[in-house]
Image (cartoon, rainbow, N blue to C red):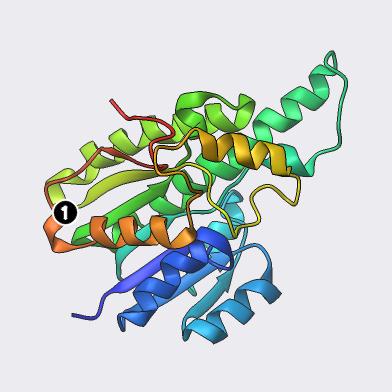
Amino acid sequence: MVRSIVVTGGGTGIGLAVASRFAAQGHTVTITGRRSDVLTDAATRLGARAVPFDASDPDAVTAALTDLPERVDVLVNNAGGNIGFDLPSRNQDDLTGLAQEWRANYAANVLSAVLVTTALTPRLADDGRVIMIGSIAARTGAGSYGAAKAALEAWTIDVATRLGPRGITANLVSPGLIEDTEFFRGQLSDQRRATLISRTATGRAGAPEDIAATCEFLASPGAGHLTGQVFHVNGGAHFGR
């Protein structure tokens, strides 16, 4: 059965890998993101539809509804990232800059998922799937970014409870170190990379396809009784309990 899939932040990295996996199976895929050029290029390569907008902007989300599918079987909330990498360095006592960073990470990682999921809830098919992309940082700590991803974990439970009566599941996939993404903005040193890999049991960094495969399972009929859960995909760098 051909399903309608929406992946936010689908132009690069994990989102692109998720979208590619579903597109390869013949599903109808819509990818969203802020950068129109990147998104259009990715959509052309995938045979998907590109709908550019800022998922953390309520007006932009509302305006995008005209171009988003009327029926959504699977929603993958991947948009986000550590906005701290994009902000200028600041002094420890710069409370204004600190507040800017915390608000930016909350908007990018939590509000984006809240707005898109809420806007598309009337279009979610019964027995549909909502999948959040979290981070190991929610359990191991990473300032405002880790706190935002922890909030996303909490909100996933709310979604699972609220939509469960319709047979819709909501789960969160929590990656560890994933290479071949734009996450670190080129700021990951060889030493830091080696340290992160040394913490795994598998002895390797993750790949976007590792996350895409987990999303594929969670979107499958066989995962219909799994909801409100956090799935740690980190090679054993953190053991979920």
Compared to residue 190, the image places residue 66 above or below, namely below
Residue sitting at 43 percent across and 63 percent down? 209
Q: Report whether 23 appears left or right of 143.
A: left
Q: Nearer the viewer, residue 185 or 191?
A: 191
What residue sits 83% from the left and 16% below the top?
A: 92
- Relative to the observer, which residue lies in front, 57 or 19? 19
Which quadrant of the view contains residue 99?
A: top right
Q: Which residue is mark 1?
A: 223
Left or right: 144, with 99 as reference point: left
- Quadrant of the image containing the N terminus: bottom left
Towards the viewer: 238 or 12: 238
Residue 154: horizontal and vertical position, in percent? 37, 30
Question: Where is 12 relative to 54, above or below?
Answer: below
Looking at the image, residue 227 sits to the left or right of residue 107; the answer is: left
| Residue 69 in sight from this viewpoint | no
The structure residue drawn at horizontal position 50% and vertical position 70%, both measured from the top left corner, is 31
Kindly identify the amino acid type of the residue bearing the numbered disc 1. Answer: Ala
Picture layout, residue 125 above or below residue 56: below
